Amino acid sequence: MDEPWDCMIRVEGALAPHWTAYLGGLRIAPAAGGGRGAGLTELRGELPDQAAVREVLRTLHALGYPLHSLTCTPVRRPAGGG
């Protein structure tokens, strides 16, 4: 659970790029395919651990952005690498 995670999070609505510092450094960009004209925002990047993923999700919830989709996979590093 302590390994880094490569994440792609989509939320409903337009999220300004200045929030990246509060969202684990994830890149923020508009995404295609928003429903009911709301648009989607996509957040992509690597988070250090599962706790960081949860914190980003809590922050998005607190800001009022409904989750559309979430894909996170553990980043596998070669043994002895970093």
Image (tube, rainbow, N blue to C red):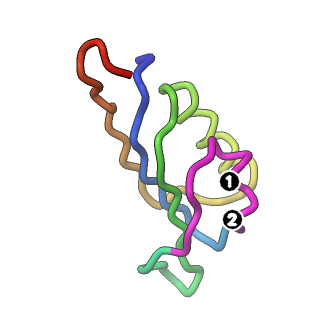
The correct choice, above or below, for 61 with respect to 79 in the image is: below
- Residue positioned 71% across, 57% down in the render: 64
Which is more toward the observer, 33 or 1? 1
Secondary structure state at the residue bearing disc 1: helix
The residue carrying pointer 2 sits among few (fewer than 14), some (14 to 19) or many (20 or more) residues within 10 Å by Cα, namely some
The correct choice, above or below, for 70 with respect to 5 in the image is: below
Secondary structure state at the residue bearing disc 2: helix
Which is more toward the observer, 69 or 9? 9
Q: Amino acid at mark 1?
A: Thr
* Mark pair 1, 2: CA separation: 6 Å
Residue position for label 2: 17
Residue 71 horizontal side relative to residue 31, left or right: left
Which is more toward the observer, 49 or 33? 49
Q: The C terminus is located in which quarter?
A: top left
- Residue positioned 75% across, 61% down in the render: 18
Residue 77 horizontal side relative to residue 69, left or right: left
- Residue positioned 54% across, 75% down in the render: 30
**x and y percentages locating residue 43 in the rendered image:** 53, 57
**Quadrant of the rendered structure where residue 19 is?**
bottom right
- Residue positioned 37% across, 42% down in the render: 72
- Residue 20 - label: 1
Q: Which portion, as a residue range, is magenta?
A: 16-30
**Quadrant of the rendered structure where residue 51 is?**
top right
Q: The N terminus is located in which quarter?
A: top left
**x and y percentages locating residue 71 in the rendered image:** 36, 48
